[in-house]
Amino acid sequence: MKYIASLGKQPTDLKRIILTHSDGDHVGALAALKAATGARVYANPIEAQAIEAAHPSRDLKMKGVQALLFKYIAEPFFKTKPAHVDDFIDDGDVLPILGGLRVVATIGHTPGHISLYLPAHKILFGGDSMTSTKSGLRCSRGMNTWDEAKAKEAVKIQAALGAETVCVGHGPVVRGAPVKFPEA
Ligand SMILES: [Zn+2]
């Protein structure tokens, strides 16, 4: 809300909220933001179901003490309120935003994860399909990754798009992207 104000805009100027997936750290403020702005919400059908039920679209791969610590210490911070998804979007859809915003299925981190690509500007929004560091991009992996093999496929799909700039959910914006994908 502060960022919208810093642009000299009103909350109601926010027209669309597009979710890459349903993890709590990405949708935790959705219900409040939707109520404050009246924006339409877009998500893949699998992720939309999870968002509306206020639970993740896949379980984290944890056992024993790690699972207990997560349940009692970390999980309360990831609690979300259910929020309504207005429109389903999926692979191949093009939204009329900034010259065409293309939806790219990037399954792996979660079962219905999507990324978004702006061909006119060569900007890719990768959600959590990858993370970034100053030196480059890394494939989603480990306990929060639903299917690591599919996650690697999702990186290949995205590397082939021709993006110059990649924005992911966790880590800095990556420029000069063609040589910064994991296999490059
Ligand atoms: Zn995530």
Image (tube, helix red, strand yellow):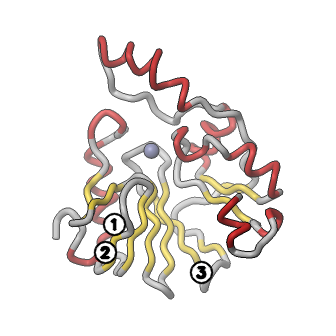
Query: Is the CB atom of the residue marked by disc 1 within 8 angstroms of ligand 1's nearest atom?
Result: no
Q: Are marks 2 and 1 in contact (CB under 8 Å)?
A: yes
Q: What residue is at 31 percent from the left and 59 percent from the top?
A: 132
- What residue is shown with label 3? 100
Is residue 121 shown left or right of residue 51? left
Looking at the picture, how far across and down is residue 51, in whole percent?
A: 63, 39
Judged from the image, the secondary structure of the residue bearing numbered disc 3 is loop
Q: Is residue 74 positioned above or below 63 on the image?
A: below
Judged from the image, the secondary structure of the residue bearing numbered disc 1 is helix
Q: What residue is at 80 percent from the left and 57 percent from the top?
A: 37
Using the numbered discs, state the Cα–Cα distance from disc 1 to disc 3 in whole angstroms: 18 Å
Three-letter amino acid code at disc 2? Ala
Looking at the picture, how far across and down is residue 117, in whole percent?
A: 48, 73
Q: What residue is at 50 percent from the left and 47 percent from the top?
A: 112
Q: Is residue 40 positioned above or below 24 on the image?
A: below
Query: Is the CB atom of the residue marked by disc 3 within 8 angstroms of ligand 1's nearest atom?
Result: no
In-front residue for pair 42/149? 42
Badge 3, how many Cα within 10 Å: few under 14, some, many 20+?
A: some
Nearer-N-terminus badge (3/2): 3
Q: Are marks 1 and 3 in contact (CB under 8 Å)?
A: no
- The label shown at residue 160 is 2
- The label shown at residue 157 is 1
Looking at the picture, how far across and down is residue 127, in whole percent?
A: 45, 56
Three-letter amino acid code at disc 1? Ile
Q: Is residue 145 positioned above or below 42 on the image?
A: above
Q: Are marks 3 and 2 in contact (CB under 8 Å)?
A: no
